[in-house]
Image (cartoon, rainbow, N blue to C red):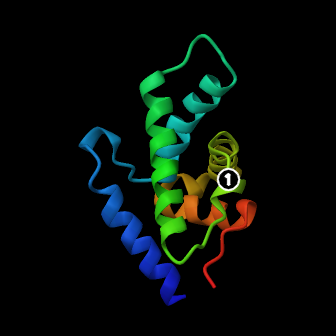
Amino acid sequence: MNRLKGLIGLMLVLSNLNIASASFYDAGTLADFCKEHIKFADLEEEHDRLAAGICQGYLASKIEVMTLSQELCQRETLNLDQLAIDVVAYASEEPQRATVSAIRVVVEVLQANHGCTLD
């Protein structure tokens, strides 16, 4: 449990280094950006490229932190497009999840769906 708290703390510090418009305060905001990434990945003509890029960059940075933190994730098996889909689905499953911190949701999705561990 202490590792999880430490990892989430590290990720929160790193996410606060982003520019103000790219800061994520909750999972709902991240899910909205990731919906645009999904449109982009599906080659839909109408999508917000900036939002899609913010989603991809945010998810990639968290994967990087988890990978560097004692090899918790197998990078070669991770797919940003699938991770974005999973984050949107996870945040949508229960309305109260939209108000949870984005980093917590990303960590939970990486653990549940992508083989990342905090053991």
Q: Using the image, determine if residue 43 lies above or below residue 9.
A: above
Residue 9 placement, left or right of 46: left
Judging depth in this view, the residue of 9 and 61 nearest the camera is 61
Q: Nearer the viewer, residue 21 or 75?
A: 75
- Residue at 74 percent across and 60 percent down: it is 113
The foreground one among 1 and 70 is 70
Q: Tell me if residue 69 comes above or below residue 85 in the rendering.
A: below
User: In the picture, residue 118 is in which quadrant?
Assistant: bottom right
Residue furthest to the front in view is 76
Q: Is residue 85 left or right of residue 64?
A: right
Q: Residues within 10 Å of mark 1 (few under 14, many from 20)?
A: some
Q: Position of residue 88 (x, y in %)?
A: 64, 44
Q: Which residue is mark 1?
A: 78
What percent of the width, then of the height, locates residue 70? Answer: 53, 78
Secondary-structure class at tag 1: loop
Name the residue rendered at 34%, 41% in the picture.
22
Q: Residue at x 58, y 73 (%)?
A: 71
Compared across the picture, whether 10 is left or right of 109 comes to: left
Furthest residue to the top?
45
